[in-house]
Amino acid sequence: GILLEVLEQPTYKSMAQGVDAVEMRSEARVGQDEEAGLVCPEIKLSWRDVTFSVNDGSKTILDKVWGHAQSGRLLGMLGPSGSGKTTLLDTLAGRVDGSKRGRNLRGSILVNGMSVQDAKKREGMRLAYVQQEDALVGVITVRETLQVAAALAAEPSDRVDDLIREFGLESAANTIVGTIFQKGISGGQKRRLSIAVELISRPRLVLLDEPTSGLDSSSSLAVTSQLKSLATATYSDKCEKMVIAFTLHQPSSMIWELLDDCCFLAAGKLCYFGPAQQELISFLNKIHYSVPQFSNIADHVLALINEDFPGHADVQQIVNEFLNLGTKPEDNNDEPQAGTITIAQSETRAPWLSRFFILCHRGSKELLRDVGIVGVRLAMYTMLSILICLMYLNLGRQKKDSDVIARVSVLFYVAAFMVFMSVAVLPFFVMQRPIFIKERCNGAYGVSEYVLSKFFVSIPGVLLIAIVSSVIIVFPTKLNGFGLYFLDLFISLMVAEACMSLVASLAPHYIIGIALAAGFFGFNMLCEGFFRVKHDIPDWLIWGYYQAFHTYTFRVFMWNEFKPIKRFDGPQFRDGDSVLRFYDMGDVVWWKDILVLLGWLVFFQISFALVLYFYHTGRR
């Protein structure tokens, strides 16, 4: 009686009606295709004897796993934590690197009998992978996110409106995704948006890693219902269907009803693969693990195969019983079928120049809308510049030896600490890294256009910081040569920002990145020729003077300030040249040092690109 009362509540009734509606829409699509005389070719993604081990075979993550996913049928992969379901999904998506030392990856993955091991063929088939974590640009809206994805994939703009409508995002279309500073859309809407972004290019194969994790029951059901609709959908103009497979952690009864096929893994071993409803119940009855009345089938099976807690079944027995069913396909069951699938020879995406401008446009919106990237930094530099101005007001009119030391000190402070403050951008670069990895792996763009767009987008913000800082410091303090001072500071800040990009690409976490950057900058400050002039630096450490880009910043500042000065009033320094000679900078040629700084800028940018290209491939 209690169960019936619960099921009669409005929330549960509406959820159940939603499941029925999905099934009715699926049947309606099939009927429409039949009436139109369409016989759409089926797509079958199959895998055989997939085995993956690490530590030279001492640990097996996947053990001869097999199965298949078909268009028109929704496949759910389940298993307790650590069972290998995400590794299997990554393997199917080509994101597991079996060539790394100590690893062994074997098995075959086929699409209608054709090998898809080659990465180019995978991309040509437009395989979409939706990872568990939402990697989205937080300061742009839902509509803008999809518009960028459509432009990168060379898809028409009406595709954006279709996906917004299909995924129920109309009410949030003009709402930003959300950042740590600004509230945006809900978690369920982010999940749907992440899926919609990957579907923008009409992929034939769609793999999703736990798309319902972290969502409430209603949002989880909505997401799964949409996947069910997509699995049974047909693009009538092209007669294409999708293969959809996804991992699940603990589905509700209503979500379970939407699954056509299921795959259960435990400790990397296949416990069951096949239809998700009556066939699974029959198998459990046969091995004497019948599903209790009113129980969730998925919960029951997961409790049986989870060996981390007491009360589980004999998992190896279940594995053996399933193998004894004889349902494993023979090697000749997936022969190539002519005309059933077309593998594109090239990626479906916009030309290089178009991708570059699209990324520049998106990056500009990030720059203007994210207060942390420019706004907070500009405030920091402004306040610090005001303090320097007040501390050294009218310094340029004073000619005593102590005033000379003060001038050198303020130039060192600007060259060292104001450049050091570029460390503040490192956390933002680290937070943007997952977005790049996701979009690159899914074929949206490459490394070159990303690095160049990032460089050009950063110029206006750094330019503004350099201009404001220079105006506040140079004119009130009466320092010399505003133009060269500004140029030197601007280029130095660009070099520091490029350095931070490189560190962010190498550091696994922004805290480690900040520590590395602080150590590197601290060493450069020590060696740049202020604390000890060049001829006093020990021979075994003189290389630090030449490799520190701060050195060239400081040298240009010094030349710009002291070269025009013809007389000082103190006994130690008679003119500007004597100051330069004292600091071992009498041989400075300012434009050569500027070229050295530009060389460091190019070096850091190229190194950043190389690290992204070879290290951040998305394969684990």
Image: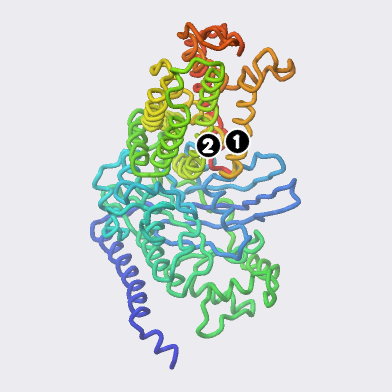
Q: Is residue 132 above or below residue 593?
A: below
Between discs 2 and 1, the one toward the N terminus: 2
Quarter in which the N terminus is drawn: bottom left
Q: Taking 341 as reference, is 431 left or right?
A: right
Q: How many marks?
A: 2
User: Given the image, on which type of amino acid does mark 1 rest?
Assistant: Ala
Q: Residue furthest bottom?
A: 1
For the residue pair 288 and 314, the one nearer the viewer reads as: 314
Q: Taking 28 as reference, is 443 left or right?
A: right
Residue at mark 2 to residue at mark 1: CA–CA distance = 8 Å
Question: Which residue lies under the disc numbered 2?
Answer: 423
Q: Could you tell me if the residues under marks 2 and 1 are in contact, i.e. CB atoms within 8 Å?
A: yes
For the residue pair 121 and 387, the one nearer the viewer reads as: 387
Q: Is residue 132 visible?
A: yes
Q: Label 2 crowding class (10 Å Cα cut-off): few <14, some 14-19, many 20+? A: many
| Image color mode | rainbow
User: Given the image, on which type of amino acid does mark 2 rest?
Assistant: Val
x and y percentages locating residue 475 in the rendered image? 38, 23
x and y percentages locating residue 437 in the rendered image? 49, 42
Question: Which residue lies under the disc numbered 1?
Answer: 518
Q: Is residue 124 visible?
A: no
Q: Is residue 268 above or below residue 565?
A: below
